Image (cartoon, rainbow, N blue to C red):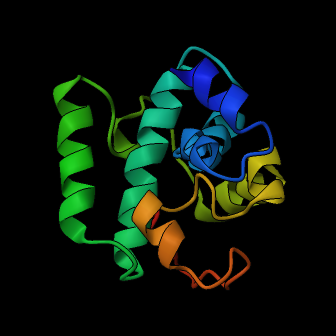
């Protein structure tokens, strides 16, 4: 399925952007942890998805029920849905935001991977200001 989407949308102008969901947050977590065994890439992206949905909901750009549904589904699969669930890790919002600003997907299309799909569609511009604090938990 992924290969079909990538082939269909080489420049990430449509459906392919959905594949970025959770990656901006996830890459920041991986960078902060040093890409070790504490959090594998898929786990980081899954946690990033919950963060993207909670962030979108905190800004009023997506229903809170969507964030709860994503969190419940990922938790049911045994994945971490809160930063506190990552063993021996303490995250600082400023450090994560710094990593997010450097993320290649975030630099190219800032809204991709940062917001839920519904929130991305509602934003007037991907460069809209992000209020602080940004609801990272």
Residue 11 sits above or below residue 30 on the image: below
Rendering coords of residue 8 (x, y %): 68, 33
Is residue 39 at all visible to an observer of this figure? no
Q: Quadrant of residue 127?
A: bottom right
Is residue 38 at all visible to an observer of this figure? yes
Residue 84 sits above or below residue 74 on the image: below
Q: Image point 59% across, 62% down: which residue?
A: 93
Residue 29 in the figure: left or right of residue 34: left
Q: Image point 57% across, 14% down: which residue?
A: 37
Residue 88 in the figure: left or right of residue 10: left
Q: Image point 82% across, 57% down: which residue?
A: 107
Q: Image point 50% across, 23% down: which residue?
A: 42
- For this orientation, the residue located farthest to the front is 8
Is residue 53 or residue 3 the one in the foreground?
Answer: 3
Rendering coords of residue 133 (x, y %): 52, 79
Rendering coords of residue 135 (x, y %): 44, 70
Rendering coords of residue 36 (x, y %): 64, 18
Quadrant housing the C terminus? bottom left
Q: Quadrant of residue 58?
A: bottom left
Residue 68 sits above or below residue 61 on the image: above
Is residue 62 or residue 25 the one in the foreground?
Answer: 62
């Amino acid at each position: 399925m992924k290969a079909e989407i990538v082939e269909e949308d080489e420049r990430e102008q449509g459906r392919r952007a959905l594949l970025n969901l959770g990656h901006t947050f996830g890459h920041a977590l991986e960078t902060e942890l040093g890409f070790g065994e504490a959090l594998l890439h898929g786990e980081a992206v899954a946690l990033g998805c919950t963060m993207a949905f909670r962030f979108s909901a905190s800004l009023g750009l997506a229903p809170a029920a969507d964030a709860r549904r994503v969190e419940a589904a990922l938790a049911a699969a045994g994945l971490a849905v809160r930063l506190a669930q990552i063993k021996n890790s303490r995250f600082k919002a400023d450090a994560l935001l710094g990593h997010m600003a450097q993320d290649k997907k975030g630099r190219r299309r800032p809204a991709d991977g940062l917001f839920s799909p519904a929130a991305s569609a509602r934003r007037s511009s991907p460069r809209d200001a992000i209020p602080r604090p940004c609801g990272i938990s």
